[in-house]
Each structure stands twice: as C-alpha cells, then as structure tokens.
Image (cartoon, grey):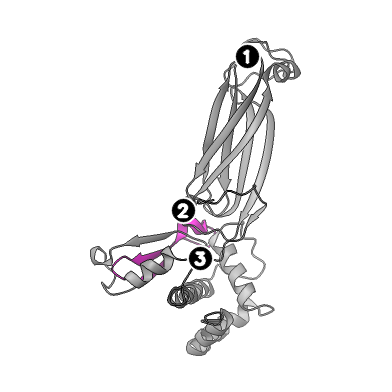
Amino acid sequence: MGEEQISLPDKLPDWDYQTNLTLRRAVEIDAKSMRVGAGLPPTAPLALAVVWTASGSGLRAPGYRFALSGQDEEVCEIEIQIPGAEVGGRLTLDTVAVLDSHNGKPEPAAPRRAGSILWRDRHEIQLQGDAPQFPISVIDFGKTSFPNDSAWHVQISGNLFSATMGGMILLVNERNSAMVRAFQNAARPRTVDKVVLSSVYCDVARTMAEHGLRSDELTEGTPYPEGTLGATIISLLDRLFPAVSLVELKLRMEQSPAHFASELRAAVRLFEEIE
C-alpha cells in the first residue's frame, strides 16, 4: 500500500481513496493433478486469474491472468494494481483456476465451458479509512460553475440505492493551496492541515446527513445494500447520533436547522483533536 509493504490484512483502517493498492502473492499450481481431478484431458488449456470486486463502487474487474499450458507444477508470481479511486467498502479478491477454452469431448462429469472454475481462493479486505469514503478530485474551479474562491464542493447525486462511489465526490479547488497541501499531507498532517481536514470532514458529514434526512427514501429498517448511499448515510447517522431515530433527526433538522447544525459539529468533534 503506497511505499509500505505489509501482509494482506482483513482490514486497512488507514486507507483512503487517494491510496492505490499493489497486491502480490505466489500461487503454486499442479496443472496435471488439477486436470486429472476435473476429468479433463492432459492437453486441456487452463488459466489462473484474479478478479477484484468493490462493494463501495460496485465495480468488478480482472486484475491478472496467466495461461497454464504446461503439465508440471508452476509457481505464479501474481501482482495486481488497483486504483484507490475505483474501490471502497469491502474489497473481494477471487483467485481462480479456470478451463481456458471449450472442452469439446468432455467426460460425463467434466467441465466443458470456457471459464468453468476448477479452483477458487477468496480473500476479503475491509477498506475503512478515516478519510471520506468516496472519490476526491482536485480541479480548477475557474473552469466550472462553482465560485472561483470556493475551497471545496461536496457533490451528491443519484438515489439512496445507488453506489456511494458513483453518487458522491469531493471536489477540491486547485487554486486553494492550503486545501491541496492538506490532502497531500493527509497521512502525516501538520496542525494547519488538521484544521482544514477537520473542517472538510464536518462539512461532508453535514451535507450527507442533510441530503439523507431530506429524502423520503431514508426510512427506518430499509435494507440498503452494503456500499450504497443509503447504507453510508445510515452508518454515519448511527455513529454521530446513536440511539436517536431517523424521525427524531428529521424533526430536529426541519424545526431548527441552525441548532441541528450545531449538534452535528459537536457530534463530529470539530477541531477536538487539534493541538
């Protein structure tokens, strides 16, 4: 992860969307025994592949493929690179050995279709950094409809059942050097960077909370799938306002929006950890 090499964990608590992932593993494959066990002829072409799926973005993509043409045992040194901006939530890595082409004369119980899985290994990683769990993009606000001097903008679109990764983005104005430096230094922030990041986090939380509470789709007990905007907002509200119902939160925001905003600033502990 970045320049640091670590064993593959179940969770990456310090991950954020600006952190790309490079994953490596060695897989030993006995192609001959695999063919025998599957009832395939000795010349049946096999392949080893890795596919990743991210619940936060809803994306699924191939990361690696290698043809197993020999008869002997092979050690495959796998390396895949995954852009941080394309993942989020729970990252699932499926390493599979498959039949690489159609088996024209299969045994009764043997696989025949290309892509038939002969072996699978699955590993899941929870990507749960403290940074906002959606893409961040640095752009020139002078080329947009946003005010030139605005430091950032939180954009939310789509319904609550759409993927958070596809429905939210934090736009950072490249004209604001303090903002850009704060995100560049997010792994080791200075005091001034902590002030900026705390302000942004508070505004992101407020925008998400208000967007959700204004929506008729946000109701108690609705089963929002993992990685959707609804699930993300529910998780945020549960963390900031534990044991407070959605009905009560909606009433607070509608009846006294200024007081609700103050409650939210207190809940996110704005500036609390700044020395």
Q: Amino acid at mark 2?
A: Ala
Specify start and end residues of the magenta stretch as a single range. 152-176
- The relative height of residue 104 versus residue 255 in the rendered view (above or below) is above
Q: Mark on residue 132?
A: 3
Residue 258 shown in magenta: no
Indicate the position of residue 180 as horizontal and vertical percent values: 37, 66
Q: Amino acid at mark 1?
A: Ala
Residue 164 shown in magenta: yes
Between the residue at mark 2 and the residue at mark 3, the CA separation in whole angstroms equals 12 Å
The residue that label 1 is drawn on is 44
Q: Nearer the viewer, residue 98 or 179?
A: 179
Indicate the position of residue 262 as horizontal and vertical percent values: 52, 87
Q: Mark on residue 71?
A: none
Between the residue at mark 1 and the residue at mark 3, the CA separation in whole angstroms equals 47 Å
Indicate the position of residue 216 as horizontal and vertical percent values: 53, 71
The residue that label 2 is drawn on is 85
